[in-house]
Structures are given as C-alpha cells and as structure tokens.
Image (cartoon, rainbow, N blue to C red):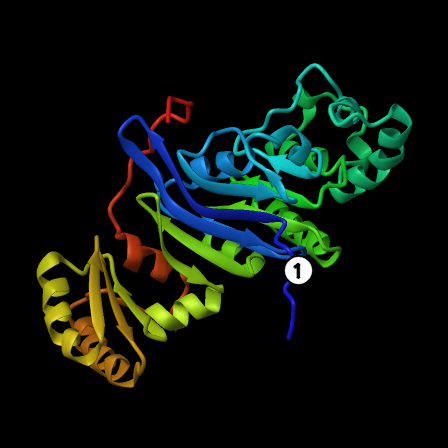
Amino acid sequence: MTIMPAALLSLDQVHKFFGDLDVVKGINLSIQAGECVGIIGPNGAGKTTTIRLCLGLVTPSSGNITVFGLQLPEQAHAARQRMGVVPQFDSLDPDFTVRENLLVYGRYFGMSDASITARIPELLQLARLEHKADATLGSLSGGMKRRLSLARALVNNPDLIVLDEPTTGLDPQARHLMWDQLKSLMKKGRAILLTTHFMDEAERLCDRLLLVDHGRVIAQGSPRELVRQHLESMVVEIYGDELDEVALQTLTDTLRPLAQRTERSGETLFCYTDDTSALLARMNRYQTEAQKSGEGIRVLARPSNLEDLFLKLTGRQIREDGPPQKETAS
C-alpha cells in the first residue's frame, strides 16, 4: 500500500465569518512538496481571505489549519520561517537598494548577514536583476519590482511559497520569465499556493485548481480534468463590426440546434459543441451570403479552455470586490 507523504499545508472544513458574512465556507485544501495548487474565482469570492488564513494572519471561525504540522494561527510565526510570500501589492522598502531589500528582509528570519549575502547573487540571477543590485527602487520598472518581490520571498529558502496575483501588471516577457522560475522551484521540491486571474497562468503552473465562488469550492481538479468534466470540447466564436442585434439574434436562433450550448456576451455569440462541422458549414454559407451585403463577420473555432470553464460556472457578470480584510470577533 502506497503511503502518501504528509501535506505541507492542510485546511480542513475552514470557515471564516466577518460579522454575519460567511466569506469562506468549509474549504478543504492540501498541498504536497513539489506541487502547485491554484485558487481561482471572481472578485470577492474569498481567495485573498483564504490566503490570509493560510498565513495565520486571519483566525478561522471554525475548522483546522496546519502548516508543516504546526497549528495556525497559534504557531504562525514558526510556520512562516519556512514560508515565502509574494503579496498582491509590492511591499518593498523604497529607501533601500535592491541588494539592501534582500539583506534587510533576510534579517527578519534571523539569518546572519553573511548567510544572506551568500544567497544574494543567486537571488539576483533568478530575478534577472544582477545589473540592478545597487539600484534604488525608484529606478526600477514595475516588472523589475515584481521580480524583486519574488526574489525577496525566497531569501529564507522556503519550502512553501504563497503567491497572491504574482504577475499582475507584468508584460508578457516578464510573466513568462516568472513562470519559468516558478517551475524551476517546483522541480526542486518547493510547494506553491497561487491565486491568479490569468487562466493561462493557472493552466501553465497548477497541478490542481480550486474554483471558488461566494466562499465555496464549486469545482476542483487538474486544469485539463476540469475542462473535460464541465465543458464541450470546442467553442465557435462569432462576432463582427457590422453584426447588429437583429442579425446576431437570427444567427443565435439558426445555430442553437447545431450546438450543445450557446451564450451571448455583448456582440459575440459563443457556440459550445463536440463537433464543429455542422456549425462551420452553416457559417460558411452565412458568410458567403453576408459578403454580398457588405456584412463583416468573423468566425473562430478553438478548443475549450479554463476561461470558458470560469465563465460557465461563475457567470459573465462583473463582480464587486469583497468585504474589507480585517479581523473581527469570530
């Protein structure tokens, strides 16, 4: 019989109330060494509160949280000695240089200046900031600051890294660089807990995903398992500058019998199906007819993805941010 190693992080039926509002509703979560687990969901779904619970910054109203076998929040200080954290918003010290930010942060973990100094070249190389070691923060771009935040989170060589929206505001090159660095850390046995609004990021990095809405886990599994379980295999998107409301409604009525599911969002019609042949043949005829009247229509057929899953299970409406993240009596 195979014995599973103990989880580095475990949440068992965790609830968190802010006043009468149940923000986190019975979440279960575990992370093993070398694994990346992602939490995705709309604004106000409970993601950041869950992260704060995992760091011992918020006391659960009920349920149990352990990190490295230590109870949270009672033993949070000891647990965080083996954790690295990249918060949603940078908390770098603007009065220090890049090198000094790493040095001072390492002291918070009781590390000697000599041991921190020995790690700094490796951390600067990981963040591609070797040439900026003595630069002030004011001279860094937003992407450089974000990479420095990741390097700083690794100064204590943590076993568990917690990332809250780590690539927000980064350009594509910087995002891919951070993904590569995080994958490298996972290969070395580091565990990662990640929240993100980027579905391509979740698909690239995460072994497992928890989709959270209104504080509750509504779906979980690997990215591919979730797409396969909840969606048709293909999506046909239809849109166009000259496709007015009447024409779009006519198309919707025409194509609905040829798809398992259709959705309208603004000026775009989404047709979900496991077989696109009938849909595309009908659209070819429609486009040929439309061209005669100067109507511009675009058709895109593609595999279903995590964004489709997200929208199907949580809806397309805009969400407001959640409640203020402050402790109240539980």
Looking at the picture, how far across and down is residue 122, in whole percent?
Answer: 83, 41
Image quarter for residue 66?
top right
Q: Is residue 33 above or below residue 248?
A: above
> Residue reaching furthest front?
1
Q: Observer-nearest residue: 92 or 143?
A: 92
**Where 325 sits versus 72, above or below?**
above
- The image quadrant of residue 76 is top right
Residue indicated by mark 1: 5
Q: Is residue 301 left or right of residue 88?
A: left
Q: Nearer the viewer, residue 62 or 289?
A: 62
The residue located at (26%, 51%) in the rendering is 316
Q: Residue 310 vs residue 180: left or right?
A: left
300 relative to 135 in the view: left or right: left
Left/right placement of residue 164 relative to residue 284 reads right
Residue 313 in view of the camera: yes
Q: Position of residue 246 (x, y in %)?
A: 8, 61
Q: How many labels does the image show?
A: 1
Residue drawn at x 66%, y 60% is 5
Local packing at callout 1 (Cα closer than 10 Å; few below 14, some 14-19, many 20+) is few
Nearer to us in this view, 160 or 245: 160
Q: Percent position (x, y) of residue 8?
A: 63, 49
Q: Can residue 203 be seen in this snapshot? A: no
Residue in the foreground of this view, choosing between 221 and 118: 221
Vertical position of residue 102 compared to residue 234: above or below = above
**Label 1 SS:** loop
**Image quarter (top left, top right, bottom left or bottom right) of the C terminus:** top left
Residue 105 in picture, x, y percent from top left: 73, 25
| Residue at 68%, 32% in the rendered image | 78
What is the three-letter code of the residue carrying label 1?
Pro
Classify the position of the N terminus by image quarter. bottom right
